[in-house]
């Protein structure tokens, strides 16, 4: 079911719906009376109230009073068509309305959301109010009414109660389950064939069970129903219960074949009672297993989401731990790790590794002239230009320390490294960041470039030392220049 609140129906739609509820309740009340009322006055099954509860719960809390009144009118019509006296009709219909009101109020009205019996605490409320309390109160009241009107025994509620509680336990979960969004999704084109095959399996098993002459065989339908819950969810299990109910009704009304025809008391009333007990057990079993299985799935999904959030957090923390907080490029820790990795990779493949060390010219003077914040902005700008200048995913720009940056260039020979270094130097100068303390009048950088092919006895530290020496030469040579290691 949708989690959105149900809107109030317009006058015309509400009127049509109320007439439909009157007709439905009247028909089911008449069927309940005509197919099983015994000599003492207790029907064998009573599904009218359960159907009314289902309609109200699906319609939303705002319209429950008009629908309850329509149900009362339908019950009155059903009793009158059956031939009950008007006084008895009104009294019994009032009892049935009380049962419906207790169920609806206890299950749906106090819950400011659509009812979903797949939630365990809502299922507990349903069993407490709709299956037990409502039928118990209505049965006792009906027993008193019939005792006063017809002189029937006060023990009559013991016979009225099973019909009401079984109707509630079968119809309401089945209708609400079939109305679930998950159930409708079972009939989407991509799932329709699988759903139909599973339901056909249930139909075959149910037909085999009901057509036998031994009652214990009937309960072998439970494993396939529970399998259906695992495969299709709670909605699929309730669909299976619907298929079983349809096949069960066919064999229940057959007087000559099937296991229900072999009972010691094969009257229709007795066969209907056996069928109701069986269907109630099936629906409640499927509902409980569906809820437990759904909870397990939700826990599993929650665990997977938590694990993914943990992984995202770990990746974020790892990224933060490897990032220089001021400039946003890699920090010295990531530089050292990457330098070592690329050195060993070049050693295995026999390729070159180049390293650029970049120093902002006269940065101390820049800070003294302009202050700390402009100095930070200057470093961020130089880091951004260096990152734009290194276009390959394998290249790494890192803050080497203070106002120095390093650029690792895997699989790059000396000529290519010098070209990249010169482009970097030129782009920083062209950015025209003012620097009155620098000879050029703008911010410039000096770059030391070193290239090595790893050999036996050499290490990554040798490449760093060579790049430092080249940088020192660039600064000694007048700054704003690129110097290559010999």
Image: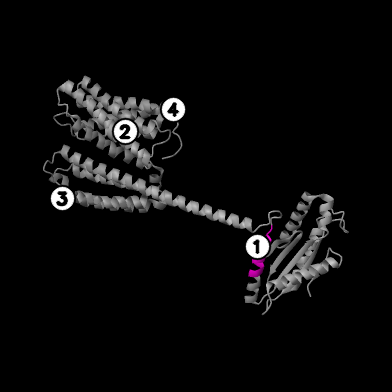
**Residue corresponding to mark 3:** 214
Q: CA distance from mark 4 to mark 3?
A: 53 Å
> Is residue 330 a member of the stretch shown in magenta?
yes
Instruction: Give the magenta range.
Output: 329-341
Horizontal side of residue 132 vs 449, given as left or right: left
The quadrant the C terminus occupies is bottom right
Q: Which mark is residue 10?
A: 4
Q: Which mark is residue 334?
A: 1
Do residues under tags 2 and 1 come within 8 Å of each other at their CB atoms?
Answer: no
Q: Under tag 3, what secondary structure?
A: loop
Residue positioned 22% across, 26% down in the render: 142
Name the dominant secondary structure of the magenta segment: helix
Q: Quadrant of residue 17?
A: top left
Q: CA distance from mark 4 to mark 1?
A: 66 Å
Horizontal side of residue 243 vs 418, given as left or right: left
Sequence-wise, the earlier of marks 2 and 3 is: 2
Q: Residue furthest top?
A: 87
Residue 456 position within the rendered picture, expressed as x and y whole percent measured from the top left: 66, 80
User: In front: mark 4 or mark 2?
Assistant: 2
Q: Which sits in the foreground, 260 or 361?
A: 361
Q: Quadrant of residue 354?
A: bottom right
Q: Which mark is residue 129?
A: 2
The quadrant the N terminus occupies is top left
Badge 2, how many Cα within 10 Å: few under 14, some, many 20+? many
Sequence-wise, the earlier of marks 1 and 3 is: 3
Sequence-wise, the earlier of marks 2 and 1 is: 2
Horizontal side of residue 90 vs 266, given as left or right: right
Q: CA distance from mark 2 to mark 1?
A: 64 Å
Residue 455 position within the rendered picture, expressed as x and y whole percent measured from the top left: 68, 79
Q: CA distance from mark 1 to mark 3?
A: 76 Å
Q: Is residue 365 above or below residue 99?
A: below
Sequence-wise, the earlier of marks 4 and 2 is: 4
């Amino acid at each position: 079911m949708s989690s959105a609140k149900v809107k109030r129906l317009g006058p015309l739609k509400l009127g049509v719906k109320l007439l439909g509820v009157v007709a439905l309740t009247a028909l089911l009340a008449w069927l309940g009376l005509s197919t099983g009322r015994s000599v003492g006055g207790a029907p064998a099954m009573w599904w009218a109230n359960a159907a009314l509860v289902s309609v109200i719960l699906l319609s939303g809390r705002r319209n429950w009073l008009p629908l309850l009144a329509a149900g009362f009118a339908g019950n009155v019509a059903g009793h009158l068509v059956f031939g009950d006296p008007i006084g008895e009709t009104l009294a019994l219909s009032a009892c049935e309305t009380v049962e419906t009101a207790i169920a609806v109020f206890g299950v749906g009205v106090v819950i400011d959301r659509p009812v979903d019996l797949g939630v365990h605490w809502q299922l507990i409320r349903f069993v407490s109010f709709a299956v037990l309390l409502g039928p118990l109160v209505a049965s006792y009241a009906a027993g008193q009414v019939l005792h006063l009107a017809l002189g029937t025994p006060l023990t009559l509620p013991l016979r009225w109660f099973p019909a009401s509680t079984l109707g509630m336990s079968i119809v309401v979960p089945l209708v609400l389950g079939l109305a679930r969004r998950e159930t409708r999704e079972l009939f989407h084109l991509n799932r329709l064939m699988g759903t139909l095959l599973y339901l056909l399996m249930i139909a075959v098993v149910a037909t085999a069970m009901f057509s036998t002459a031994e009652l214990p065989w009937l309960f072998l339908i439970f494993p396939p129903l529970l399998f259906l819950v695992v495969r299709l969810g709670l909605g699929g299990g309730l669909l299976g219960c619907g298929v079983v109910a349809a096949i069960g009704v066919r064999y229940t009304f057959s007087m000559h074949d099937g296991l229900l025809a072999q009972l010691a008391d094969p009257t229709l009333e007795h066969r209907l009672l056996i069928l109701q007990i069986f269907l109630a057990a099936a629906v409640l079993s499927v509902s409980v297993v569906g809820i437990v299985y759904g909870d397990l799935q939700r826990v599993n999904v929650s665990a997977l989401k938590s694990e993914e959030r943990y992984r995202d957090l770990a990746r974020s923390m790892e990224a933060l731990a490897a990032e220089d907080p001021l400039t946003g490029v890699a920090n010295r820790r990531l530089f050292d790790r990457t330098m070592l990795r690329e050195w060993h990779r070049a050693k295995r493949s026999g390729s070159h590794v180049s390293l650029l060390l970049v120093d902002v010219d006269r940065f101390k003077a820049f800070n003294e002239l302009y202050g700390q914040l402009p100095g930070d902005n200057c470093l961020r700008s130089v880091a951004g230009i260096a990152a734009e200048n290194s276009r390959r995913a394998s290249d790494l720009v890192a803050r080497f320390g203070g106002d120095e940056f390093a650029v690792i260039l895997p699989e790059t020979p000396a000529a290519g490294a010098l070209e990249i270094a010169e482009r970097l130097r030129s782009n920083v100068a062209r950015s025209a960041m003012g620097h009155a303390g620098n000879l050029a009048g703008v911010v410039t950088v000096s770059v030391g470039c070193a290239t090595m092919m790893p050999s036996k006895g050499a290490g990554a530290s040798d490449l760093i030392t060579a790049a430092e020496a080249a940088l020192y030469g660039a600064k000694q040579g007048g700054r704003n220049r690129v110097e290559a290691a010999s």
